[in-house]
Every structure is written in structure tokens, then in C-alpha cells.
Amino acid sequence: MSFYDDESMDMGPAGQSKLESYLFSCELSSKVPLYTFQGDEEEDLEHFLELRTVCLGEGAKEESNVVEVTAMNHQGKTISVPIANLHINCLPTVSLGEFELKAPVTIRLKSGTGPVTVSGLHLIASEVGDSDLSDADDDEDDEDEEEEIMPVKPAKKKQKL
């Protein structure tokens, strides 16, 4: 499921969702082998991590660097999956497309010393309230009124003398 295609999506009878996206990046190494992505605890916000690239950084050694993510599956169970096996000589970077996970997500350098940079987007979906929707409708109504064309009155004919 990708939020990138539409700026808003239906959330059913409750309303619509507003989507904001921010750049995300973290660096993993032997000194800092894991990073946990968590969203705010606000009730009306959902946080997603859309991973795009995993690449070796400057100074990476000739070794295998395996990056693993841990997140919840559709049954609510935590699972870990390797997403990249990088090597400076043959595969220094991997493009993941739009690999989207719901927070919380832990990214871990399972093997190797790095540095490995993981980048993508932090997506925040918030429910748009009824008052926000009515304000948007009011703005559209105002625009319609401004664009309304006044009816043209026929010209009066001059009488011949």
C-alpha cells in the first residue's frame, strides 16, 4: 500500500486522511548497530517508514554487511527480515523501491562493521476532521462564486428616424 500516489485517502465514514512526508536517514555501524523508528503517541496519527535505499558509506571494509528490519506482520507478531547484503566490491547500494512499514521499526546491522546508510521517507497520516473538510468546501464555494459569469443583457436597438 503506497500513500505516495494520492495526497489523501478515504478512511471510511469517519473522514479522510492527510499525508505528510519527511526525509528519513540513519547510519548503522559497529559502534551504533541498530536504530528504532517510532512515531509520536498521538491517537489520530499513524507513522510509516518508507525505505528507499541502503548503501555503504565511506570507509566501508571488504566484508559482507547484512541489514535487517524488525516490524510487525499482519497478525501483530514481530518478525525480522534481512533487506540487504552489501559488499563494497560487488553491491555497494540497494534500491528498495517503496518498502513501507508501520512504526515501530527496528533497523539493525546484523553482520559487518559498516558504515551503512539507510534512507527513505517518514510518512505521517492524520485524520482530517469534519471542520477541516467544511473549510475546504467553503473555499471551493467562494471560488465558484467568483467565477460565475453574469448574464448578458441584449442590446437595445436604435430606432430609425
Image (tube, helix red, strand yellow):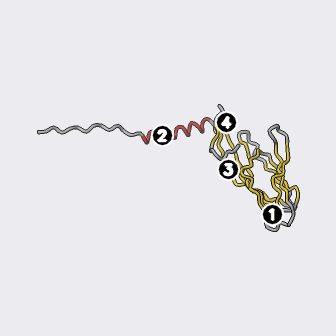
Local crowd size for mark 4, using a 10 Å CA cut-off: few (<14), some (14–19), many (≥20): few
For the residue pair 94 and 27, the one nearer the viewer reads as: 94
* Residue 157 in picture, x, y percent from top left: 20, 38
Which residue in the structure is indicated by mark 4?
11
Q: Could you tell me residue 138's position as x and y percent?
A: 52, 38
Lateral position of residue 146 relative to residue 31, left or right: left
Q: Quadrant of residue 54?
A: bottom right
Alpha carbon of mark 3 to alpha carbon of mark 4: how far? Answer: 18 Å
Q: Residue 80 in the image: x percent, y percent?
A: 85, 47
Residue that mark 1 sits on: 90
Q: Give, as a three-letter code, the residue at label 3.
A: Ser
Amino acid marked by disc 2: Asp
Is residue 51 shown left or right of residue 80? Answer: left
Residue drawn where x is 87% and y is 60% of the image: 112
Q: Quadrant of residue 40?
A: top right
Question: What's the residue type where badge 4 is placed?
Answer: Met
Circles 4, 1 touching at the beta carbon (< 8 Å): no
Residue denoted by label 3: 21
User: Closer to the N terminus: mark 3 or mark 2?
Assistant: 3
Q: Which one is in front, 96 or 145? A: 96
Tell me the residue that label 2 is attached to: 142
